[in-house]
Image (tube, grey):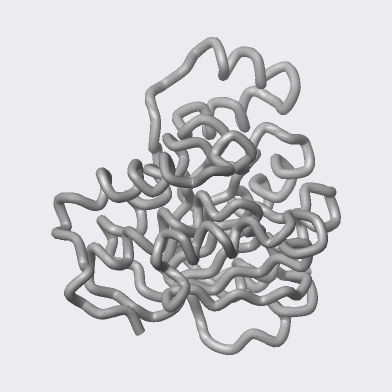
Amino acid sequence: MTDSTSVPPATEWRERVAADYAKNRYTAGTSVSLAESLAIAACVADNRLERTLEIGFAHAGSAAAIIAAKRSNAIFNRHIVLDPYQISHSGSRGLEVIEELGYSDDLDFNEVPSEEYLPRCAGTFDFILIDGGHGLGQAMVDAFYCDRLLKIGGYMAVDDIFMPSTAHSLRFLIDECGYKVIPSGPSRPLRQLKYSFKLGVSYASKLGRSTEGLAILKKTRDYRGGY
C-alpha cells in the first residue's frame, strides 16, 4: 500500500483535492465539478469513512477526491470502483489520472457492470457514490442494491439528481428507505422553483440545498421492503 509518509495533514485535504482536480487533464470532461468533488471529500474526510465504493469512474475526478480524503485520515484500504466502459468508452483516462496522481495503490478497479457486482458483494460500506448508468432501470437497480450494502449511519452520494430517472431512485431512498438528505450547499430558491415544475415541489425542496447536481444522503435505518 501507499507509504504513510505521503499522508497530507488533515487540514490540507481541501487543497489536495483542488490541486488534484487542476492536474487532471480531463477536468473539462469529468462527470463531477470541483465543488462536487469537495463536497464528496468533505463527507468522507469529516466522517472518517473507510470502506468506499463508487459506481461510474469516467475521468476519476470523484475517485481522486475520495482517495485524498481517506489519505487525510491515514486510511489506506482501497477505494472500489465499478465501470464496465472505462476502457472501451473512456479510453482508460480515469486509470491514467489515478496513476499520474500517485493513487494506483489506493484503487480497486473492476471492469464489471454494477448489476453483476453488487448482488454478490460481501460486507457493508461506509460510503457509496452512484454515478453510473442514468436510465430508469439502472438507476433503480443501483439504488436498491447500494442500500443493501450501505451500513446504518453510512453515507450515499448520488450525482445528476435533477434527471427524472435519478429523481425516481432518490425518492425511493428518501421516502421508502428513510434516508436523510444532508445539506451540502446554499439554498437556491430559483433552482427549487425551476425543478418544482419538472420533478415536483416536495422533491425540489428536499434537494434544493445540494451541491450543484450532487446529493448526499445518510442511511438512518435498515429497510427490507414489505407487502
Q: Measured along the vertical axis of the image, is residue 178 above or below residue 120?
A: above
Q: Position of residue 211 (x, y in %)?
A: 46, 33
Pick the quarter of the image with the C terminus: bottom right
Please state if 159 lies on the left or on the right of 44 as rendered.
right
User: What residue sits 59% from the left and 34% below the top?
Assistant: 28
Please state if 142 lies on the left or on the right of 24 as rendered.
right
**From this viewpoint, is residue 161 visible?**
yes
**From this viewpoint, is residue 151 visible?**
no
Q: In which quarter of the image is residue 205?
A: top right
Q: Position of residue 144 (x, y in %)?
A: 70, 65
User: What residue sits 50% from the left and 80% below the top?
Assistant: 124
Toward the viewer: 216 or 117?
Answer: 117
Toward the viewer: 189 or 115?
Answer: 115
Pick the quarter of the image with the N terminus: bottom left
Q: How many labels does the image show?
A: 0
User: What residue sits 37% from the left and 43% below the top?
Assistant: 38
Q: Measured along the vertical axis of the image, is residue 115 above or below residue 123?
A: above
Q: Position of residue 72 (x, y in %)?
A: 23, 63
Please state if 102 lies on the left or on the right of 143 as rendered.
left
Q: Measured along the vertical axis of the image, is residue 222 above or below residue 205?
A: below
Please state if 87 lies on the left or on the right of 64 as rendered.
right
Q: Position of residue 81 (x, y in %)?
A: 59, 69
User: What residue sits 42% from the left and 49% below the top?
Assistant: 40
